[in-house]
Amino acid sequence: MLEHLTQLLADVDGAWATAIGGVDGLLVEGHTQTGEDLNLLVAEHAGLLRAAQHAYTHTLTGGDTRELYLRGERLSVYLQPINPNFFILIALDARSNLGQARLYGRAAARKLEAFL
């Protein structure tokens, strides 16, 4: 799994971390170019993903959440669900390419689904 995360980091311009997280908030595997705490990134974003999934499937009847992108002043994160229990997290900087994150994130999710 680490091989796929390392390749994902190389493929996405502006990405500085990639991880596989569980919707329970636990880090499964991760790779970063910085010293950032991937456990914290996964835990916090798992909660946001769960909230979005609940809102879309129950409150808004919008169907399953297919992706989630959050952009703050100093942090942007793209989440791609792998299956109902796991997701890919890609942390991005200000010069990031969201299109690459979406394209390569989906491809990585399909490959990683076999492991999870």
Image: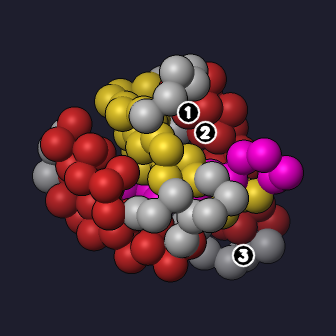
Assign the N terminus to one quadrant of the image: top left
Q: Amino acid at mark 2?
A: Ala
Quadrant location of the C terminus in the rendered image: top left
Q: Which residue corresponds to the image point at 81% horizontal and 65% vertical from the top-left?
A: 59
Front residue (pair 74, 83): 74
* CA gap, disc 3 and disc 2: 20 Å
Q: Is residue 84 magenta?
A: yes
User: How was this image coloured?
Assistant: secondary structure
Q: Which residues are magenta?
A: 72-85
Could you tell whether 70 is left or right of 103 in the image? right
The answer to whether 44 is drawn above or below residue 115 in the figure is above
Up-down relation of residue 47 to residue 78 (above or below): above
How far apart marks 2 and 1 lie (CA) works out to 6 Å
| Marks 2,1: beta carbons within 8 A | yes
Dot 1 corresponds to which residue?
Answer: 42
The residue to which callout 3 is attached is 61
Residue 55 location, quadrant? bottom right
- The x, y position of residue 71, in whole percent, is 76, 58
Q: Residue at x 68, y 59 (%)?
A: 94
Which-is-in-front pick, marks 3 and 1?
1
- Looking at the rendered structure, the secondary structure element under dot 3 is loop
Q: Observer-nearest residue: 79 or 31?
A: 31
Q: How many marks?
A: 3
- Considering the numbered disc 1 on the image, is that residue within a helix, a strand or a loop? helix
- x and y, in percent, of residue 21 in the image: 44, 36
Numbered label attached to residue 46: 2
Q: Residue furthest front?
A: 95
- Please state which amino acid type lies under the numbered disc 3: Thr
Q: Is residue 114 magenta?
A: no
Q: Earlier in the sequence, mark 3 or mark 2?
A: 2
Residue 66 relative to residue 88: left or right: right
